[in-house]
Image (spheres, rainbow, N blue to C red):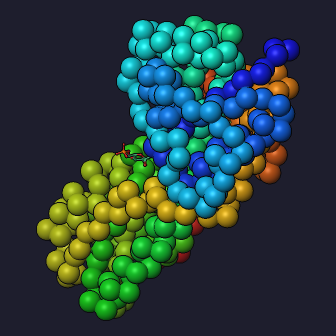
């Protein structure tokens, strides 16, 4: 077993509420285990640019309730080059840092895997931090619960005005490649339709459904559209539907980055904290090259090569249930 003395924690890719709770847990668990702990600002880019800050217990005080990430984040193109990774490695070696906790998504773990192949003397543990909840090896990712609650808060408000004006609303939620946010929030708000990248959207079918609703005096409707839906998103879809079904006054609302911010829910604080703690425990026990996740309330370690975006994670039963309940 390697003798780890210094570790660093970073956040990478899109920020997600609960990342700060996770950083806090990594730092304090590291200190408890007698490790020196560093924070790396702006993810892998900061590793390349030597942007390291020493962390102590008070540097993570009063952050558990804050959204975003105190370490900042980036999607580093330079880390995809051998030269960039070499500079990052040299910065780690110059401080004798021999283990990293990387909080992020698919791209974060791909970067970690390539880096570990080149520099096997650096241990890596990944933690799932993305609002998209699209990774295998964990039931939920840090930030997802807050994001879906932000969406339902916004859509409930839109429902009030939609009902008052008898309008049809197309509401776009995040998820370039994943319909998880759309599906869960859509069920939560009782949407009339939920359109996601994992299934083909048939506009004829949607219009038929709107017609049926209209005939039984449904005066307003909410359609949730994932950003990555094959129709091209809420605006593109609304433009097509408006041409063919003119009964409703139609509006489009794109929720955008409000879904990534805000104070994390208790579930996300809990998940971030638990995973941060388990990451350091895993490193100390000699584990490396894995993402730590929670499946059925049990800690699970998934090798980086399998901790990738998982389209099969989408529960088709939920899609069917949502369709039945929207009728
Ligand atoms: O990965 C999280 C996510 O919010 C996706 O849902 C979204 O498509 C993407 O990030 C947006 O990224 P950016 O903030 O770089 O535009």
Residue 241: x and y, percent?
21, 66
Residue toward you, 28 or 106: 28
Residue toward you, 133 or 54: 54
Residue 298: x and y, percent?
82, 46
At 63% from the left and 17% from the top, the residue drawn is 95
| Count of numbered circles on the image | 0
At 38% from the left and 86% from the top, the residue drawn is 160
Determine whether, in the image, residue 263 is placed left or right of residue 161: right
Residue 299: x and y, percent?
80, 42
Q: Is residue 36 above or below residue 29?
A: above
Residue toward you, 220 or 12: 12
At 29% from the left and 55% from the top, the residue drawn is 233
Can residue 184 be seen here? The reply is: no
Q: Which quadrant of the rendered structure holds the N terminus?
A: top right
At 58% from the left and 44% from the top, the residue drawn is 129
Q: Is residue 59 above or below residue 157?
A: above
């Amino acid at each position: 077993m390697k003798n780890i003395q210094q570790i660093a924690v970073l956040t990478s890719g899109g920020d997600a509420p609960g990342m700060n709770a996770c950083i806090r847990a990594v730092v304090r668990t590291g200190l408890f285990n007698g490790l020196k702990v560093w924070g790396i600002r702006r993810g892998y880019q900061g590793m390349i640019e030597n942007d390291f800050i020493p962390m102590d217990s008070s540097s993570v005080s009063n952050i558990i309730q804050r959204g975003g990430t105190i370490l900042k984040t980036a999607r580093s193109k330079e880390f995809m080059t051998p030269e960039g990774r070499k500079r990052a490695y040299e910065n780690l070696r110059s401080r004798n840092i021999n283990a990293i906790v990387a909080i992020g998504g698919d791209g974060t773990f791909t970067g970690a895997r390539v880096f570990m192949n080149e520099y096997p003397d650096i241990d890596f543990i990944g933690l799932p931090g993305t609002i998209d909840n699209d990774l295998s090896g964990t039931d939920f990712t840090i930030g997802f619960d807050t994001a879906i609650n932000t969406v339902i808060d916004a859509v409930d408000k839109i429902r009030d005005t939609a009902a008052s004006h008898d309008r049809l609303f197309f509401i776009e939620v995040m998820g370039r490649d994943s319909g998880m946010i759309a599906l869960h929030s859509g069920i939560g708000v009782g949407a009339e339709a939920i359109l996601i990248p994992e299934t083909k959207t048939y506009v004829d079918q949607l219009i038929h459904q709107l017609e049926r609703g209209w005939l039984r005096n449904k005066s307003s409707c909410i359609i949730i559209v994932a950003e990555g839906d094959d129709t091209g998103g809420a605006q593109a879809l609304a433009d097509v539907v408006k041409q063919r079904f003119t009964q409703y006054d139609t509006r489009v609302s794109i929720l955008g980055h409000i879904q990534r911010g805000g104070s994390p829910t208790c579930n996300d604080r809990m998940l971030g904290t638990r995973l941060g703690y388990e990451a350091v425990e895993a490193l100390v026990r000699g584990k490396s090259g894995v993402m730590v996740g929670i499946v059925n309330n049990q800690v699970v370690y998934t090798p980086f090569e399998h901790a990738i975006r998982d389209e099969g994670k989408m529960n088709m039963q939920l899609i069917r249930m949502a369709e039945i309940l929207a009728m």
